[in-house]
Image (tube, grey):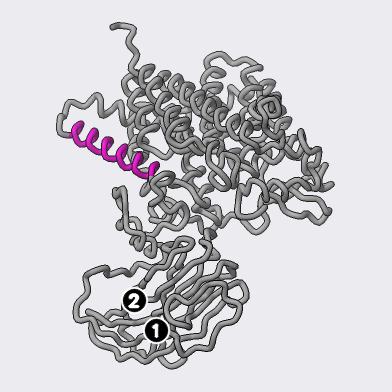
C-alpha cells in the first residue's frame, strides 16, 4: 500500500466523471443551433479557422450569413462588426482559434470522407472541438495535481481535485461548455505555474521562453490575462528580503527575461497582424460599446448578487478565500504572488461593464483563476485534515457534501433540467426553485417581478373584467380569438394594445392580481423580444408603481394559457390602473382575452 496515491486515484475518478458528463450526460456536439458546441461566443472564437482555411475570406466573411442561416449558432451574426475600412473585424481575439487548430485540422481532414460537408460547422467539427476541449481539461487537471504536490500533501491535493470538479462550476466548463475560453485558460494557468516552478528550480533560457510563450498565448486568448505575468515574476517571494533577492536574480538573468518577452510578443503579433491585414490599422478595439467601469467596479454584484454572484453559485470557493490565511501562515512564499494576482484579477473581472458575462452557470469569468486559487483551497484542506477536532471536520465534510450536491443540481438545471436562468436570475426566482428538480412554469414570472402570492389570498374582490367583445375586428391577425368573436392581438405590424384603464379604490393592506388569457402561435425565444404584460398604478398622470412580466417565459408555441401577475399596491395615493400589452419588436403573433383584476388581502 506504500505506492497508493490518493491524488492519482482522485485524478482518475475526476477525469472519468468529466468524460462521462461530457460524452454521455450532455454531449454538446449532439445539440443544435444555440446549444451546439460551436455556438454563441465559441463560434466567434472559432470563425478565424473556417475564414482562413476553408473560405479564404478573412476580410469580408461573406460565408458568415450562410452559416448563420444554416446552423443558427446565435440569435444573430454578432461575432464581427463592419469596420470603417469596409471590412469585417471579428469581435474576439484569435487565441482560442490557435488552440482549436489541431482539432479543426482533424475534423477538416475527415469531414468529406465521413459524408459530411467540409464547411467548418458540420458534425465532425462540432465533435472535434468538443472532444479536444475535454482533452484540454484533463491535461489541466493533471498539471494542477503536479503543481499542488510540490507544496501540499497527497491527501490534501486529492481533496482539492474532487472539490474543484464536483463542487464548483469548473465542472460545467471542463465537461460541457469546455470550448469556452475558461477551460483552456485554466489549463494554461496550470501550465504557466508548472513552467514557473521548473524555471526557478533550474533557470534555463528555454524555460523562460516557454513561460513567455504561455503568457503570450493567454493574453492572445483573453487580453486581461496579462495579469498572469505577476505569477512568474514574484512566485516564491515571501518577504521584502525575498523581493530584493528576486530583483538581483533578474539583474543576473536579464538574458532570460528578454527572450521570454520576445516569445510573448511573437505570439501576440498574430492578432496585430490580423488587424493590420484586415483594417490597415495596428490596433482595433473590437468590443465597441463594451468597456470597463474602472472607477466603479461591480464587486458586490459580482460576488454575492443573485443574478450572477460568484459565491452564491459557487460557495465552495469560500474555502479558497479562507485558505489565504493558511497560505500566509505556512506558505508565505506562495501568498504574495497568488494574493496580489487574485486581488487584481477580481478587480479587473468585475470592472467590466457586462459584469455578469452573459448566459452562463455562475461567474464563468472566475473559472480560469481556480488553477491559482487551488493553492489556498489546498492549504485549507490540509489544515482540516490535520485537525483532530471531530466536530470541526464533520462540519467541513457536511458543507462539502452540500456544496457538491448544490453544484450538481445547478449543473443539471443549467442544461437538462432547465430551471436555472443563465442570465437573469433574481432573488425571488432563486428561492422559488432552490434545490427543486421541478417547479411550476408560473415560477418563471419571478424573473421579471418579485411579487407572487400564489394561493395565499383572502377576501378576493373582482374589480374589473373585459372580454373585449366590444372591440372592432382586428384585421390581419393570424390567430383566431380565444373566446367569442373579438379579442386583442399583437403581431409584427401591431406592437401595442390599447391602454386599458379602470378606477381603483385604495384599501389598507390590499394587493392586486391581474389575469389575462394568452394564445401563442410560434414561441418567441429571444428574451428581449418576449411580449410584455405591463400593469401601472397611476395617480393622475403620474405612475406611482409599475410591474411587467414577459409572457413567453410561461407560454409555449400553440398553447393557450391564463397568466396572472401580482402587485403590492403602494401606500401613496392612487386612483386608477393602466394595463398595456407590448410585443417588444417581436414578429410572433399573440392573442389576448379574458382580462380581469382582483383586489385581495
Image label count: 2
Label 2 – label 1 distance at C-alpha: 9 Å
In terms of sequence position, does the residue under pointer 2 or pointer 1 come before the other? 1
Q: Where is residue 377 in the image (x, y as percent from the top left)?
A: 36, 32
User: Within the image, what quadrant is residue 567 found in?
Assistant: bottom left
254 or 85, which is in the foreground? Answer: 85
Task: Rate crowding at label 1 as few (under 14), some (14 to 19) or many (20 or more) other CA atoms within 10 Å.
Answer: many
Element at badge 1?
strand
Indicate left or right for 185 with 312 as reference.
right
Predominant SS of the magenta segment:
helix
Magenta residue check for 326: no
Kindly identify which residue carries mark 1. Answer: 537
Q: Where is residue 185 in the image (x, y as percent from the top left)?
A: 55, 34
Q: Residue furthest top?
A: 2
Magenta residue check for 404: yes
- Above or below residue 400? Residue 600 is below
Indicate left or right for 437 with 15 as reference.
left
Task: Rate crowding at label 2 as few (under 14), some (14 to 19) or many (20 or more) other CA atoms within 10 Å.
Answer: many
Q: Position of residue 517 (x, y in %)?
A: 40, 74
Q: Which residue is drawn at 30% across and 58% down?
A: 432
User: Within the image, what quadrant is residue 250 found in?
Assistant: top right
Indicate left or right for 167 with 66 as reference.
left
Whether pointer 2 and pointer 1 mark residues with C-beta atoms closer than 8 Å, the reply is: yes
> Which quarter of the figure is the N terminus placed in?
top left
- Above or below residue 407? Residue 82 is below
Q: Which residue is drawn at 76% across and 33% down?
A: 53
Q: Give the range drawn in magenta.
A: 392-412
Q: Which residue is drawn at 37% across and 92% down?
A: 503
> Which quarter of the figure is the C terminus placed in?
bottom left
User: Within the image, what quadrant is residue 301 found in?
Assistant: bottom left
Kindly identify which residue carries mark 2. Answer: 567
Amino acid at each position: 500500500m506504500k505506492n497508493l496515491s490518493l491524488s492519482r486515484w482522485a485524478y482518475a475518478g475526476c477525469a472519468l466523471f468529466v468524460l462521462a458528463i461530457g460524452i454521455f450526460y450532455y454531449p454538446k456536439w449532439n445539440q443544435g443551433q444555440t446549444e451546439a458546441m460551436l455556438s454563441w461566443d465559441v463560434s466567434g472564437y472559432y470563425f478565424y479557422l473556417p475564414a482562413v482555411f476553408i473560405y479564404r475570406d478573412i476580410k469580408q466573411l461573406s460565408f458568415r450569413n450562410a452559416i448563420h442561416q444554416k446552423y443558427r449558432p446565435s440569435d444573430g451574426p454578432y461575432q464581427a462588426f463592419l469596420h470603417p475600412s469596409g471590412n469585417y473585424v471579428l469581435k474576439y481575439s484569435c487565441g482560442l482559434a490557435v488552440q482549436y487548430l489541431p482539432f479543426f485540422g482533424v475534423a477538416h481532414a475527415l469531414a468529406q470522407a465521413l459524408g459530411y460537408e467540409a464547411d467548418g460547422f458540420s458534425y465532425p467539427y462540432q465533435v472535434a472541438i468538443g472532444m479536444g476541449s475535454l482533452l484540454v481539461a484533463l491535461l489541466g487537471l493533471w498539471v494542477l495535481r503536479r503543481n499542488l504536490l510540490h507544496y501540499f500533501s497527497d491527501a490534501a491535493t486529492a481533496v482539492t481535485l474532487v472539490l474543484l470538479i464536483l463542487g464548483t462550476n469548473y465542472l460545467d466548463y471542463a465537461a460541457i461548455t469546455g470550448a469556452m475560453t475558461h477551460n483552456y485558460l485554466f489549463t494554461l494557468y496550470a501550465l504557466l505555474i508548472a513552467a514557473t516552478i521548473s524555471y526557478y528550480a533550474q533557470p534555463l533560457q528555454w524555460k523562460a521562453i516557454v513561460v513567455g510563450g504561455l503568457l503570450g498565448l493567454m493574453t492572445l486568448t483573453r487580453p486581461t490575462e496579462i495579469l498572469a505575468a505577476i505569477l512568474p515574476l514574484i512566485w516564491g517571494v515571501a518577504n521584502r528580503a525575498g523581493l530584493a533577492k528576486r530583483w538581483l536574480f533578474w539583474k543576473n538573468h536579464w538574458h532570460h527575461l528578454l527572450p521570454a518577452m520576445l516569445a510573448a510578443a511573437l505570439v501576440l503579433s498574430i492578432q496585430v497582424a490580423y488587424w493590420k491585414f484586415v483594417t490597415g490599422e495596428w490596433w482595433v478595439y473590437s468590443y465597441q460599446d463594451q468597456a470597463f467601469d474602472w472607477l466603479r467596479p461591480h464587486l458586490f454584484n459580482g460576488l454575492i448578487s443573485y443574478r450572477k454572484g460568484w459565491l452564491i453559485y459557487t460557495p465552495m470557493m469560500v474555502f479558497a478565500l479562507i485558505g489565504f490565511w493558511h497560505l500566509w501562515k505556512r506558505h508565505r512564499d506562495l501568498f504574495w504572488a497568488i494574493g496580489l494576482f487574485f486581488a487584481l484579477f477580481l478587480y479587473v473581472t468585475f470592472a467590466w461593464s457586462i459584469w455578469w458575462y452573459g448566459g452562463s452557470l455562475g461567474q464563468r469569468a472566475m473559472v480560469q483563476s481556480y488553477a491559482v486559487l487551488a493553492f489556498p483551497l489546498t492549504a485549507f484542506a490540509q489544515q482540516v485534515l490535520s485537525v483532530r477536532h471531530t466536530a470541526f471536520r464533520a462540519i467541513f465534510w457536511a458543507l462539502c457534501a452540500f456544496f457538491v450536491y448544490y453544484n450538481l443540481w445547478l449543473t443539471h438545471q443549467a442544461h437538462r433540467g432547465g430551471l436555472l436562468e443563465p442570465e437573469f436570475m433574481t432573488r425571488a426566482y432563486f428561492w422559488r426553485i432552490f434545490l427543486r428538480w421541478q417547479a411550476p412554469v408560473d415560477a418563471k414570472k419571478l424573473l421579471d417581478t418579485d411579487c407572487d402570492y400564489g394561493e395565499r389570498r383572502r377576501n378576493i374582490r373582482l374589480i374589473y373584467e373585459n372580454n373585449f367583445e366590444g372591440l372592432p375586428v382586428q384585421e390581419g391577425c393570424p390567430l383566431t380569438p380565444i373566446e367569442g368573436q373579438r379579442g386583442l392581438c399583437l403581431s409584427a405590424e401591431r406592437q401595442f394594445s390599447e391602454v386599458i384603464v379602470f378606477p381603483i379604490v385604495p384599501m389598507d393592506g390590499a394587493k392586486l392580481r391581474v389575469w389575462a388569457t394568452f394564445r401563442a402561435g410560434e414561441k418567441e425565444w429571444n428574451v428581449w423580444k418576449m411580449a410584455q404584460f405591463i400593469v401601472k398604478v397611476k395617480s393622475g398622470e403620474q405612475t406611482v408603481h409599475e410591474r411587467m412580466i414577459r409572457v413567453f417565459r410561461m407560454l409555449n408555441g400553440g398553447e393557450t394559457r391564463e397568466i396572472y401577475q401580482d402587485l403590492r399596491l403602494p401606500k401613496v395615493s392612487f386612483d386608477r390602473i393602466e394595463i398595456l400589452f407590448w410585443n417588444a419588436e417581436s414578429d410572433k403573433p399573440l392573442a389576448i382575452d379574458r382580462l380581469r383584476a382582483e383586489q385581495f388581502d
